[in-house]
Image (spheres, rainbow, N blue to C red):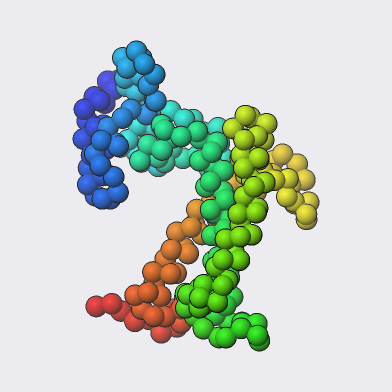
């Protein structure tokens, strides 16, 4: 069957940029394979033979997203995998996703319970309050301390000595075999991605409505 012409992919990439307002059209016109010097023709031929992304069917699947990594559905419309090591990107995705999952839990719990020695307030207001009280500096200090160890782990990941995001942390011994471990890894990356979207939604919802999550659910206020 005839492959989709390269200029069609270019136009589709450009339309995604205009719709998302997230980048310039140039960022989308590069091929799914990061070309080396003198290999432009080879990269173009590989692109024509390449299957489309499962997540974005009208764009070619990025070369680095070959389905071997857990949670890979070929989603990379901005072409990050063409410019950065996929292992480094997965390490960052898992780290941000894990923080987001903790943030979502804390955001919701704080609506119902606050330690007696802390003032009762909405989560977003609590953030601003504790920053003025020096809490932000403490968080930055301890996170920087932890990052010293994660940098070492990241180098091991890039060298192929360690799976991205794997700190051998399983105190409950949930991953009893490889099949179970793969299932939990799939679940983690899905929950991590959902949490990153959710925490952004929680915060922006409060900025717009001045209502917390469950308050909004119980007393919905339309923006119209």
| Residue at x 57% of width, y 61% of height | 140
Q: Position of residue 73 (x, y in %)?
A: 46, 40
Say which of 74 and 100 sits in front: 100
Say which quarter of the image contains residue 219.
bottom left
Q: Is residue 108 visible?
A: no
Which quadrant, please, contains the N terminus? top left
Which quadrant, please, contains the C terminus? bottom left
| Residue at x 58% of width, y 71% of height | 135
Tell how many labels: 0
Q: Position of residue 57 (x, y in %)?
A: 34, 38
Say which of 120 and 61 sits in front: 120
Above or below, 113 relative to 98: below
Q: Position of residue 196 (x, y in %)?
A: 48, 57
Say which quarter of the image contains residue 145.
bottom right
Q: Position of residue 74 (x, y in %)?
A: 43, 37
Say which of 117 and 52 sits in front: 117
């Amino acid at each position: 069957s005839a492959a989709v012409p390269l200029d069609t992919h270019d136009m589709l990439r450009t339309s995604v940029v205009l719709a998302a307002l997230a980048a310039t059209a140039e960022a989308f016109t590069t091929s799914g394979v990061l070309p080396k010097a003198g290999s432009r023709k080879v990269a173009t031929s590989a692109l024509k033979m390449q299957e489309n992304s499962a997540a974005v069917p009208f764009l070619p699947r990025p070369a680095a997203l070959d389905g071997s990594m857990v949670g890979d559905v070929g989603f990379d419309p901005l072409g990050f995998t063409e410019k950065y090591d996929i292992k480094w990107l997965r390490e960052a995705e898992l780290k941000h996703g894990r923080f987001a999952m903790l943030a979502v839990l804390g955001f919701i719990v704080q609506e119902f319970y606050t330690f007696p020695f802390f003032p009762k307030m909405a989560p977003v207001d609590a953030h601003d309050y504790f920053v003025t009280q020096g809490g932000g500096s403490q968080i930055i200090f301890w996170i920087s301390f932890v990052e010293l160890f994660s940098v070492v782990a990241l180098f091991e990941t890039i060298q192929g000595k360690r799976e991205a995001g794997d700190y051998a942390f399983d105190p409950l011994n949930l991953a009893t075999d490889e099949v179970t471990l793969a299932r939990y890894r799939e679940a983690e990356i899905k929950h991590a991605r959902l949490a990153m979207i959710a925490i952004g939604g929680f915060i922006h919802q409060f900025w717009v409505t001045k209502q917390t999550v469950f308050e909004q659910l119980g007393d919905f206020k339309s923006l119209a």
